[in-house]
Every structure is written in structure tokens, then in C-alpha cells.
Image (cartoon, rainbow, N blue to C red):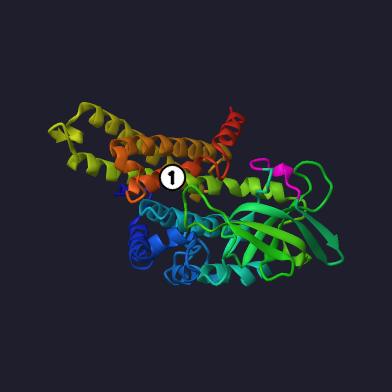
Amino acid sequence: MLPARAVYTEEHEMFRDAVRGFIKAELVPHFARWEEAGIVDRVMWDKAGEAGMLCPQVGDAYGGVGGTFRHNAIVVEELAYAGMAGPQTDLSVHNDVCAGYLISLGTEEQKQRWLTGMVSGKTVCAIAMTEPGTGSDLQGIKTRAVRVDDNFVINGSKTFISNGQHSDLVIVVARTSDAPGSKGMSLILVEADRPGFRRGRNLDKLGHLSSDTSELFFDDVTVPVSNLLGAEGTGFASLMSELPQERLTLAVSSMAAAQKAFDITRDYVNNRKAFGKTIMDFQNTRYKLADLKAELAVGWAFVDQCLEKHDRHALTSADASIGKLWCTEMHGRLVDTCLQFFGGYGFMREYEICKLYADARVQRIYGGTSEIMRELISRSL
């Protein structure tokens, strides 16, 4: 089970109990079907909103409970530990990424218009950064938003967009000027019912099978200038200011999923027998699991430091990058080691360790690859 940690109070643990109850009642009965379908039911969003699991950091002025990011982290941890990588990704993008941009950059009118719906689940939000051919190179995006009178006309395409199929609102990263590099980038809010907005296919993935991951297309999509999120031309700076929280979220999710892989492996080797004794009786098994337990303890300690810093608005880009790099890389090593103990059964999708293995791989890619994290950390040396 997830370890008890001093970073959380009794009130946080009460919230955790509610999240666990929601997962058991509303997600577990449907999860296998969602994995097969490659997407969750849209009604999941309404139920998550009713249960208080959406944007818990949003204040009561917009329908939220006024929590802190630690409440968001609890949602991430419980979904990841339950093996719900698909719903966890969908909710994290909505809760931990998109809501952060609206809270930090949105006008009062924008917050009133959209945050309330995001809290209730009536408005599902996505953020459209990545484009075909750009990957980690955000400065290379080609989607353009041209000012025409009091509107922006948007043309371009995006890919690997979480919540792409269910989204009602998309934060689009687009070029609004010919300024080179990052200087001409802006964030624009696009409602999914705008003419010219199209959803492409729901992408088939290695893991996170029930996560809604799509292509999006913008063909002369016209939105009012009032849909600009933040100041024009400051989109790249806004992305850089919000990405540390996203990377902390990924570190948290990797820790919880790694803990689950360790726990089920420990139970398995204590019961599985070979050569007349349990797998745990072999020194090789005990020593490898001892190493994994030590890595988990170190990872949780650093993540909790980052959670505490983030609540004080003191989390640096370097610390978030360290957390994302170390925790996701450790996650990958750990789940690979754990799967080996299951032998051939570990390669079967009916075994949870197989799903955890597949789900782990993307953690080192999205939100900034491990190579990008190393580059960011090196800048602080």
C-alpha cells in the first residue's frame, strides 16, 4: 500500500479515503471495458466532478473546494496505485495542467466561464502543444493564429493530445507573430464546437490504453481575441512557468505506480514456489527487492520535499526536472525488474504487472523527455 507520509494531514487522508471509495465504486467496474474500447465513458467526468475529484485546488468562487496541490497529488497517487493509468492521465491533464493555466493566466471572465465547468465535469479541458514533427521542440510549432479585426483565425494540427476526443475546451499553443523562436507564441482558448475544429483518430498506444489521446485539426477556426490566455507573445514563458507542476505530477504518478509494482511483486514471490522453496527464499530475490525498496524510500522523500516546496511556491524548474527524471527512470527500472520475477506470466496482459510495465514506458517521454530533463538540470549547474 502507499506509505504514510508526514506531508499529508488528517484532512488530506480523509480526502484520500473519498478518492479510494470513488475509484472502487465508479472506475473499477468499468475499467476493463474502457481499456478494450481505448477511451473512458464521458459520464466518468460528471461522476468525478460530483465526487470532488476535479480541480480540487480551485476556490469556492468557481465551485471548487479550495484545496492545495496536495489534494491533486492524492488523486494522482490513488489512480496510479490502482493501476488506472488511462483515467489518471486524463484527469491529471485536466486537473494539474489545464486548470493551472486558467488559474494563473485567466481573466476573471475566463475563470467564471470555464473553471466552474471544469470543476463539475461539464467542461473537459485539453492542452494542445505537440505537433507532428516537433516533439520536444516547442519552439518549432507551426500552428498559426492570425489576428483579423477582433478575432484570431487558427490553422494547424496537433498530435498526442490527451482528452482530445472528450474535450470541450482546448488550450492551443500557436504562433501569433513572425517573431523567431519562442517570442511569437501565444496560448488561445478554443471551444470544441467552433466551426473548423476537427478531432482526428483516437491513437492506439502501447500503454495507458483507456487514455483519450488524439489528433486535433484547426481549419480557419475563428475565436474572439478575448479567448487569448495571458498576454500575446508570452505563451512560451507561460508554458515554462507551469511545466514544473506538470513534471511534479509525473514524478508523483511514477512513484505510486512503482510502489504498486513492488507491492504485487513482493506478494507474488512470497507465494510462488520453485525448486522446493518460495522465490523470496532465494538471496538474489531478497537483495534485488531490498534495492528496490531503498529506491522507493528515496523517491518518496524527494517527491514529498517537492510537494512541500510547491505549496510554498518555491519549487524550481531544476527540482521539478530532477524529480521527473529520477522518479520516471527509477519507475522504468523497477517495473522491469519486478516483471522478471513473474517469468512468462509477466508477459501476459491478464497479469497486472504486464499492464504496469506497458504503462510505465511513456513516463520517460511525455511532459518532457528524460533527455530534456537532463538539459534543464544542466542549466542550473
- Left or right: where does residue 174 sit relative to residue 264? right
Which residue sits at x=20%, y=34%?
280
- Left or right: where does residue 145 sit relative to residue 320? right
Residue that extends furthest to the left in the rendered view of this protein = 276
User: Is residue 141 one of those drawn in magenta?
Assistant: yes
For label 1, the SS is helix
User: Is residue 381 one of those drawn in magenta?
Assistant: no
Whether residue 196 is visible, yes or no, is yes
Q: Quadrant of residue 368?
A: top right
Q: Quadrant of residue 30?
A: bottom left
Between residues 41 and 307, which one lies in front from this camera angle? Answer: 41
Which residue sits at x=47%, y=54%?
209
- Residue 94: x and y in percent read 54, 60
Neighbours of disc 1 within 10 Å: few (<14), some (14-19), many (20+): some
Report the predominant secondary structure element of the magenta stretch.
Answer: loop
Which residue sits at x=64%, y=42%?
135
Give the residue at mark 1.
358
Magenta extent: 135-142
- Residue 3: x and y in percent read 31, 47
Which residue sits at x=70%, y=47%?
236
- Residue 331: x and y in percent read 41, 39
Which residue type does callout 1 highlight?
Ala
Whether residue 229 is visible, yes or no, is no
Q: Quadrant of residue 51?
A: bottom left
Quarter holding the C terminus? Answer: top right
Between residues 354 and 280, which one lies in front from this camera angle? Answer: 354
